[in-house]
Image: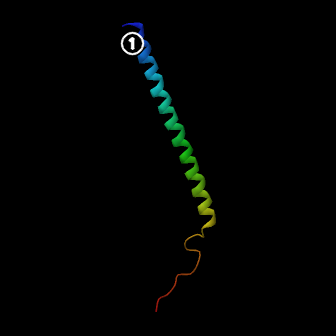
Amino acid sequence: MPVGVLLAVAIAACVVLLLAADRAVKAARKARRRREASGALTSVMPVIGDHEPRTVS
């Protein structure tokens, strides 16, 4: 193979790897934020079953 083609394939592979790594980092950050938000929400919300059940007449 000519050196030019080999170089083009190598550059394309690097770009693809960089894009995949960027998506993985973004997904990890989003998951961490979601866990933190979920933890903050559950600490504020009252626990279900904290009170007596209502009776409907």
- Residue marked by disc 1: 5
Residue found at x 60% / y 67%: 45
Question: Residue 3: where, in percent of width, then height?
Answer: 42, 7
Q: How many marks?
A: 1
Amino acid carrying mark 1 in the image: Val
Residue found at x 48% / y 23%: 14
Is 46 positioned to the left or the right of 12 in the image? right
Name the outermost residue toward the left: 1
* Quadrant hosting residue 46: bottom right
The residue lying toward the viewer, choosing from 12 and 54, is 12
The residue lying toward the viewer, choosing from 11 and 56, is 11
Name the outermost residue toward the top: 2
Query: SS for tag 1?
Result: helix
User: In the picture, which quadrant includes the N terminus?
Assistant: top left
Residue found at x 45% / y 27%: 16
The residue lying toward the viewer, choosing from 43 and 17, is 17
Q: In the rendered view, would you say 51 is above or below 32? A: below
Q: In the rendered view, would you say 35 is above or below 22? A: below
Question: Residue 55: where, in percent of width, then height?
Answer: 49, 87
Assess disc 1: are there few (<14), some (14-19) or many (≥20) residues with their C-alpha within 10 Å of its C-alpha. few
Residue found at x 63% / y 63%: 43
Name the outermost residue toward the bottom: 57
Question: Residue 25: where, in percent of width, then height?
Answer: 54, 38
Which colour style is shown?
Answer: rainbow
